[in-house]
């Protein structure tokens, strides 16, 4: 059995919506799961959050 074989990564729009808490709970959970096992998307999310800051 292979390790996690991730073919589809999360889009920037999706990561932004996720970090803004705009996604439905089930969808948000799927994204959290992906991020927990995907370094690429986790780094992307972190850089988006760093850019967006918390100016709201
Ligand atoms: Zn990914």
Image (spheres, rainbow, N blue to C red):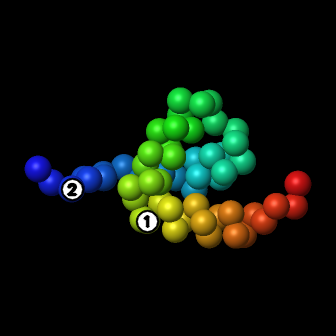
Looking at the image, residue 19 sits to the left or right of residue 55; the answer is left
Q: Is residue 40 visible?
A: yes
Disc 1 to disc 2: CB gap under 8 Å = no
Where is residue 40? Give x, y as percent: 43, 65
Looking at the image, residue 43 sits to the left or right of residue 24; the answer is left
Asked if residue 14 is positioned above or below residue 47 in the image, the reply reads above
Residue located at (56% from left, 38% from top): 28
Tell me how far mark 1 sits from mark 2, CA to CA: 15 Å
Looking at the image, residue 21 sits to the left or right of residue 29; the answer is right
Mark 1 residue CB less than 8 A from any atom of ligand 1? yes
Looking at the image, residue 13 sits to the left or right of residue 37; the answer is right
Residue that mark 2 sits on: 3
Where is residue 50? Give x, y as percent: 70, 70
Residue sitting farthest toward the left: 1
Q: Which class describes the residues within 10 Å of circle 1: few (<14), some (14-19), or many (20+)?
A: few
Q: Is residue 13 visible?
A: no
Looking at the rendered structure, the number of numbered marks drawn on it comes to 2
Earlier along the polypeptide chain: callout 1 or callout 2? 2
Residue located at (44% from left, 45% from top): 33
Where is residue 17? Give x, y as percent: 66, 46
Q: Disc 2 on helix, strand or loop?
A: loop
Residue that mark 1 sits on: 40
Please tell me whether mark 1 or mark 2 is closer to you in this view.
Answer: 2
């Amino acid at each position: 059995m292979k390790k996690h074989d991730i073919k589809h990564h999360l889009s920037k729009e999706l990561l932004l919506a996720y970090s803004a808490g705009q996604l439905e709970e089930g969808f948000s959970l799927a994204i959290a799961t992906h991020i927990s096992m995907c370094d690429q998307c986790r780094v992307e999310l972190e850089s988006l959050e760093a850019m967006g800051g918390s100016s709201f």
